[in-house]
């Protein structure tokens, strides 16, 4: 009779969506007895009414496990009993990270600033986009940001900001999404930090995504975590693939060689 091992993935909120599956693969490898191929059951718990994120990651998890020569892998999702997810909530779900989506951004910060000026996006930022942030009471946690690409990333790399430096990293330990982009009607994480930051509600994501699509701004505007009163100014060293962000009081002038890459909103 074939041996069966059970692994409960638990609540993997300490890892960013789309990355937590790797820790589960590690558990599978560690649990598998030497020279035996047991049936391995992996149970996923649906978190925050976001089953779509889990379903999307199952295929990737299965591929990772198969590379470890696991003969039989049974995947299941445990969804808590709760009220039905509304259409708005479903549309506001943040999908797992997708390197192809990251690579759809083909403009640098300088070019993004030029495009923003040419298309005169500031009036929309000041009115309709601001209203979405205030409607959901998230203006102290998030700011709108100018979508741009620092450098090329491989499929297994993430853009991670740490100590004011944004670098390409293959170390997924303790990553939290910190900026998001909208692509073809779906929200994706775009950049990460190595400490806990607020994660957006489905309702806010849905409303902002709808507005940006309506205004044709998904290629230029996304959103990111925000510290009240502080604006991030960026510059990128193309030779070292390191982007430097300086936190500065919003009332101070922009230093030479830096560019403002976000818009914060306030109640008056």
Image (tube, rainbow, N blue to C red):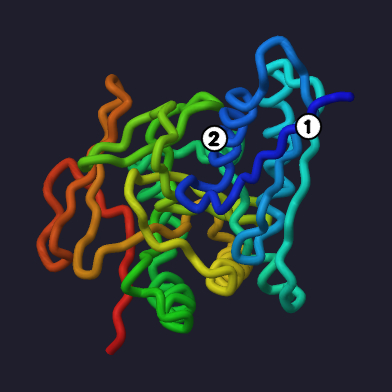
Identify the residue at the far front of this view.
Answer: 1
Residue assigned mark 1: 4
Viewer-nearest residue: 49 or 143: 49
Q: In the image, which is nearer the foreground, mark 1 or mark 2?
A: 1
The quadrant holding residue 197 is: bottom left
Q: Is residue 232 above or below residue 87?
A: above
Q: Residue 250, how many percent across, how many down?
A: 17, 65
Give the Cα distance between marks 1 and 2. Answer: 20 Å
Q: Is residue 5 left or right of residue 207?
A: right
Q: Earlier in the sequence, mark 1 or mark 2?
A: 1
Characterize the local packing of mark 1: few (<14), some (14-19) or many (20 or more) Cα atoms within 10 angstroms. Answer: few
| Residue 140 in view (yes/no) | yes
Characterize the local packing of mark 2: few (<14), some (14-19) or many (20 or more) Cα atoms within 10 angstroms. Answer: some
> Residue sitting at 29 percent across and 79 percent down?
266
> Mark 2: which secondary structure?
helix
Viewer-nearest residue: 221 or 58: 58
Mark number displayed over residue 23 = 2
> Mark 1: which secondary structure?
strand
| Residue 215 in view (yes/no) | no
């Amino acid at each position: 009779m074939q041996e069966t091992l059970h692994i409960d993935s638990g609540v993997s909120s300490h890892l960013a969506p789309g990355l937590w599956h790797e820790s589960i693969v590690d558990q599978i490898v560690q649990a598998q007895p030497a020279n035996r191929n047991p049936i391995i059951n992996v149970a996923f718990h649906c978190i925050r009414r976001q089953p779509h994120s889990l379903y999307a990651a199952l295929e990737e998890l299965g591929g990772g496990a198969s590379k470890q020569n696991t003969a039989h892998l049974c995947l299941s999702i445990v969804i808590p009993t709760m009220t039905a997810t509304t259409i708005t909530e479903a549309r506001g779900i943040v999908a797992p990270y997708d390197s192809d989506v990251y690579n759809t951004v083909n403009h640098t910060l300088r070019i993004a600033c030029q495009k923003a000026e040419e298309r005169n996006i500031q009036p929309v930022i000041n009115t309709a986009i601001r209203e979405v942030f205030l409607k959901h009471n998230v203006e102290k946690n998030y700011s709108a940001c100018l979508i741009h690409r620092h450098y090329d990333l491989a499929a297994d790399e993430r853009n991670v900001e740490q100590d004011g430096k944004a670098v390409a990293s293959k170390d997924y330990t303790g990553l939290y999404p910190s900026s998001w982009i909208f692509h073809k009607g779906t929200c994706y994480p775009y950049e990460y930090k190595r400490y806990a930051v607020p994660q957006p509600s489905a309702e806010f994501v849905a409303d902002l995504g709808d507005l940006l699509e309506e205004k044709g701004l998904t290629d230029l505007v996304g959103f990111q975590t925000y510290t009240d009163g502080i604006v991030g100014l960026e510059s990128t060293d193309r030779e070292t693939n390191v982007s430097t962000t300086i936190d500065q009081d919003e009332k101070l002038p922009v230093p030479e060689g830096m560019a403002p890459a976000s818009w914060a909103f306030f109640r008056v």
